[in-house]
Image: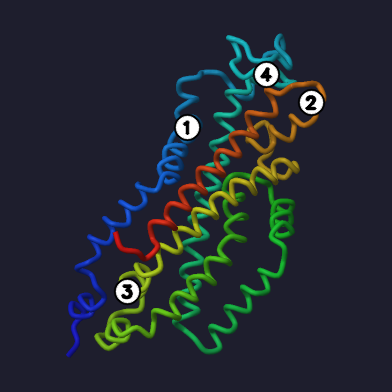
Amino acid sequence: MVTETQVANSAGEPRVQATKWRTWKRFWRYPLSSIGVIGMVLLFAFCFLGPMLYHVSPTQGDFTALLQPPSAKHPLGTDDAGHDVLARMMVGGQASLEVGFLSALVAMAFGTLYGMVSALAGGWVDIVLMRIVDILLSIPSIFILLFLNATFKPNVGLMIFVLAATSWLGVSRIVRGEVLKIKNETYVEAALLAGVRTWRLMTKYLVPNFIGTVLVTTTFAVADSILSIAGLSFLGLGLPPPAPNWGADLSAAMNYIFQNAWWLIYPPGILILCSQLFVNFIGDGLRHALETRTD
């Protein structure tokens, strides 16, 4: 009689801790990983801790200082309504980062579950589930984003749902492919013979073998989501005013591009660019660390 303990040993559980240590060591040794992590920590500190130290309202304008360049009172200047640009950059980044990370996590969770169910079920269930994914993938994601965003009143929760609704498709296909390769392994078949429940089979024997691939995909999805919300806001379809966000502020700044109001254009543009670079650096570091190699 095959026991679950024997199955776990055959899956290589005693080597898990050592493997994790080597993976993290490779991650931190990779230069871009450190830059990405430190950069994201600073970006989160700027957006979430900054407003606690810089007590200036991002929505109340100073009508005595309209379109003013950086000064001691307003370190990044003011916009056409007298709003402090620095305060708006801090608070505006909160929505971008929240939507970017949470939508990617929701997409990862749903896409992983969907892909595993499809691969494990097989037969007509697998065919139907994958044809649904193919149909949704054939529709340009921008159309889905525009439709959902125009149909419902935009808010942070809706933006998370909207972006997750288009991000999970790729994750599900990746997970399905990984599970199809893994499910015929000896230890998976032994787990089934040992009577391991389906949910435990997924979480203990399947997910650990492809979680690295999913994490790398998710980090790049975070970057895509941050860029998507900035793009929607740039088009006027993001979070409604007066709530600040980087995309909307960059869009408004374009009206003053010929008036040399550089302090309106560069801050949101640089922050969007930095968020993309830092997240992609982390994703590249994870991909580097999770490659199969000897130390």
**Mark 2 or mark 4, whichever is nearer to me:** 2
Q: How many angstroms separate mark 2 from mark 4 (CA)? A: 12 Å
Q: Secondary structure at mark 2?
A: helix
Callout 4: few (<14), some (14-19), or many (20+) C-alpha neighbours within 10 Å?
A: many
124 w.r.t. 61: above or below: below
User: In terms of sequence position, does the residue under pointer 3 or pointer 1 come before the other?
Assistant: 1
Callout 1: few (<14), some (14-19), or many (20+) C-alpha neighbours within 10 Å?
A: some
Name the amino acid, label 4.
Thr
Name the amino acid, label 3.
Tyr
Hey, which quadrant is residue 76 in on the image? top right
Hey, which quadrant is residue 68 in on the image? top right
User: In terms of sequence position, does the residue under pointer 4 or pointer 1 come before the other?
Assistant: 1
> Can you say which quadrant of the picture contains the N terminus?
bottom left
95 w.r.t. 110: above or below: above
Q: How many angstroms separate mark 3 from mark 2 (CA)? A: 57 Å
Find out whether the residues at labels 2 and 4 contact each other: C-beta distance under 8 Å. no
Q: Which residue is mark 3?
A: 205
- Of residues 255 and 216, which is closer to you in this image? 216
> Can you say which quadrant of the picture contains the C terminus?
bottom left
Find out whether the residues at labels 2 and 1 contact each other: C-beta distance under 8 Å. no
**Mark 2 or mark 1, whichever is nearer to me:** 2
Q: Which residue is mark 4?
A: 78
Q: Which residue is mark 1?
A: 48
- Of residues 183 and 19, which is closer to you in this image? 19
Q: Which residue is mark 2?
A: 256
Q: How many angstroms separate mark 4 from mark 3 (CA)? A: 55 Å
